[in-house]
Image: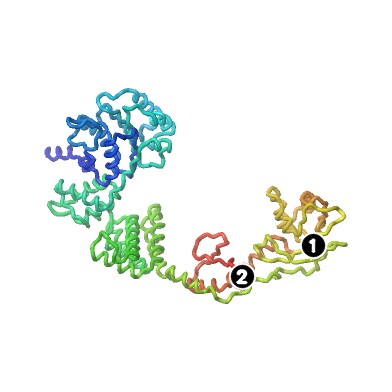
């Protein structure tokens, strides 16, 4: 009993036990090692280094290796070196974080300017025994702005005996003034095959019997992080029962993953429109321990693999069993590229929905239902071809410019007026022609105006931004009876403000330089207000658009679809139609 307790007490997790002790032990960082080798060989060693990458990729380990390399001393070597074997004079103390000249600081817990000042005060003093004083600051992005500012001057011109090594997972949070003073190394993620080979080597050293397929699942779940991969491997090793191999199914259960074959089945059911089968399969996987968010993530992977099979065909290489690859190609043959990309967008949106939903399983089921419904829609390529083939369909007549309700009372001009009545275009009515009075500009006894105003719409268009209230009242409440330079007669809307006529007269006199007579006549019957004209034009436009053959045909192709137009504000993009392009019957 005491023997078991003692072995358990002294057990060291794999992530610590197999931490790289030399640069040769590191995997996937060949570019960085080559750069450092050349720098040390030529004596061009930077005074500050910035290490960045995802969690568990080896930033802190690399920082310690770099500190050893800078201070490497052995019987055969007396300068910086990336070859750290045999261990140098200072290597053991640096590995244990106990060397007096190599100081490590966690910026996550010591973020203030006072903590940085302690470092800056000690920078002035020469190292006790090593070649360089090395300052390792982990999670450096957590430093405050004041701490970064305090560091800048020393970082730019440090003493010859001082080196700085920074590590961060959030490189974007580092001020550019600090970043520009450092030699940057981006530690790359370890790809799945390389990670699998690394885990296999550790299993051989540990005497662990785990299937290669199971190690591949662990490598995928680690997402490029060596530390995460080793932590999962630690967990997988204890799944073994005696000398039996830990197979892929046990690893899937441990990770909460679904079998890849079952994920492909689920994707095929949803993409084929079998909503009932898809819901039954996802429930079954959930009952077996699969996480809904992981299921959606796996469906995204399958969708991506299907797209590669569709584009690359037999030239596509997959890290999967031959029967799985054969099924991928068969599924790719049943889908168009437009359908695959549509499914990808649905799954991508659903991934966030599932992670944030109060009931992740319900959100995953709704995602599969959307995929099944989309299977009944025509492929995007076919819909585009059908609509493109309608370019020469017979057109429908545009709404008549004279469609606005005419006043039953005759429209007369003011006495002794030489104004002529002509139709004009109203810029306020969405492009539809409306009949308004357009007097010919004639001189009046009041003098030559500095600005001609042709009609009510022209008057509103010319108003400055600070006259929003008057502009609104004119559009809403003025029904023009006659309009000529110097005089307006209008029928006021029942809700018109009492000072509307004086306000119009004052503005017009200031704008044109002549006196204006603005007369409200409650007994006259004027034209519709500019607001009423705009609403009428909108109704006519809607009627024209809904009767257009393109829209009619689109409704036949997509029953129940919502049609939206490119020059209108949209809430969802289902189908966009543009009727603004000139047709053959227009100039």
Is residue 498 visible in this depiction of the protein?
A: no
Query: Which residue is the extreme one toward the bottom?
Result: 394
Instruction: Return the residue nearer the eye: 551 or 86.
Output: 86
Q: Is residue 253 placed above or below 124 in the rendered structure?
A: below
Query: Which residue is the extreme one toward the front?
Result: 42
Which of the numbered marks, if any, corresponds to residue 39?
none
- Mark 1 vs mark 2: in front: 1
Determine whether, in the image, residue 137 is placed left or right of residue 383. Answer: left
| Quadrant of the image containing the C terminus | bottom right
Instruction: Return the residue nearer the eye: 384 or 519.
Output: 384
Q: Position of residue 202 (x, y in %)?
A: 18, 47
Residue of label 1: 439
Which of the numbered marks, if any, corresponds to residue 543?
2
Q: Circle 1: is it few (<14), some (14-19), or many (20+) Cα within 10 Å?
A: many
Q: Residue at x 40, y 63 (%)?
A: 341
| Quadrant of the image containing the N terminus | top left
Q: How many marks?
A: 2
Q: Position of residue 383 (x, y in %)?
A: 46, 70
Q: Position of residue 219 (x, y in %)?
A: 26, 51
Q: Residues under labels 1 and 2: Cα distance? A: 32 Å
Q: Residue at x 30, y 28 (%)?
A: 133
Under circle 1, the secondary element is: loop
Q: Residue at x 30, y 48 (%)?
A: 189
Could you tell me if the residues under marks 1 and 2 are in contact, i.e. CB atoms within 8 Å? no
Under circle 2, the secondary element is: helix
In which quadrant of the rendered view does residue 325 lie?
bottom left
Is residue 485 visible in this depiction of the protein?
A: yes
Upstream in sequence: badge 1 or badge 2: 1
Q: Residue at x 13, y 40 (%)?
A: 4
Q: Position of residue 243 (x, y in %)?
A: 12, 52
């Amino acid at each position: 009993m005491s023997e078991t307790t003692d072995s358990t007490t002294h057990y060291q997790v794999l992530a610590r036990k197999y931490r790289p002790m030399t640069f040769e032990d590191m995997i996937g960082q060949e570019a960085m090692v080559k750069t450092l080798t050349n720098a040390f060989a030529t004596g061009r060693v930077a005074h500050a280094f910035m290490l960045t990458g995802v969690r568990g990729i080896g930033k802190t380990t690399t920082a310690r290796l770099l500190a050893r390399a800078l201070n490497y001393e052995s019987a055969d070597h007396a300068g910086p070196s990336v070859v750290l074997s045999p261990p140098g004079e200072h290597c053991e103390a640096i590995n244990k974080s106990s060397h007096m000249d190599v100081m490590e600081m966690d910026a996550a817990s010591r973020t203030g300017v006072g903590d940085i000042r302690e470092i800056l005060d000690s920078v002035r003093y020469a190292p006790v025994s090593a070649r360089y004083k090395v300052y390792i600051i982990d999670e450096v992005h957590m430093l405050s702005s004041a701490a970064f500012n305090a560091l800048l001057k020393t970082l730019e011109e440090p003493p010859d005996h001082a080196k700085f090594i920074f590590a961060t997972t959030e490189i974007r949070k580092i001020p550019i003034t600090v970043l520009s003073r450092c030699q940057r190394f981006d530690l790359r993620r370890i790809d799945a095959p390389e990670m699998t080979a690394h885990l296999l080597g550790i299993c051989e050293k540990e005497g662990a019997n785990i299937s290669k397929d199971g190690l591949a699942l662990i490598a995928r779940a680690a997402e490029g992080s060596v530390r995460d991969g080793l932590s999962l491997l630690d967990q997988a090793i204890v799944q073994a029962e005696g000398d039996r191999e830990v197979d892929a199914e046990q690893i899937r259960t441990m990770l909460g993953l679904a079998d890849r074959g079952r994920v492909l089945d689920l994707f095929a059911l949803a993409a084929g429109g079998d909503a009932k089968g898809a819901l039954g399969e996802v429930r079954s996987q959930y009952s077996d321990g699969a996480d809904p968010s992981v299921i959606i993530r796996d469906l995204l992977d399958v969708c991506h693999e299907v797209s590669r099979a569709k584009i690359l065909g037999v030239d596509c290489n997959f890290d999967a069993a031959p029967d799985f690859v054969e099924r991928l190609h068969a599924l790719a043959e049943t889908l168009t590229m437009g359908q695959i990309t549509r499914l990808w967008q649905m799954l991508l949106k659903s991934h966030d929905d599932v992670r944030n939903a109060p009931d992740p399983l319900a959100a995953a089921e709704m995602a599969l239902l959307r995929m099944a419904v989309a299977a009944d829609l025509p492929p995007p390529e076919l819909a585009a071809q059908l609509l493109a083939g309608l370019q020469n369909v017979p057109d429908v007549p545009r709404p008549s410019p004279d469609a606005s309700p005419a006043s039953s009372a005759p429209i007369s001009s003011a006495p002794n007026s030489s104004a002529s009545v002509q139709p004009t275009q109203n810029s306020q009515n969405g492009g539809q022609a409306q009949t308004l009075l357009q007097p010919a500009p004639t001189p009046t006894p009041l003098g030559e105006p500095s600005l001609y105003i042709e009609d009510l719409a022209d008057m509103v268009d010319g108003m400055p931004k600070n006259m929003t209230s008057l502009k609104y009242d004119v559009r809403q409440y003025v029904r023009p009876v006659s309009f000529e330079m110097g005089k307006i007669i209008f029928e006021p809307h029942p809700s018109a403000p009492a000072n509307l006529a004086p306000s119009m007269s004052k503005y017009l006199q200031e704008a044109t330089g002549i006196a204006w007579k603005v007369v409200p006549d409650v007994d006259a019957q004027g034209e519709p207000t500019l607001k009423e004209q705009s609403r009428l034009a909108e109704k006519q436009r809607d009627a024209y658009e809904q009767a257009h053959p393109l829209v009619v045909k689109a409704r036949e192709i997509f029953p129940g679809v919502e049609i939206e137009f490119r020059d209108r504000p949209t809430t969802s993009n289902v189908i966009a139609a543009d009727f603004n392009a000139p047709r053959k019957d227009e100039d």
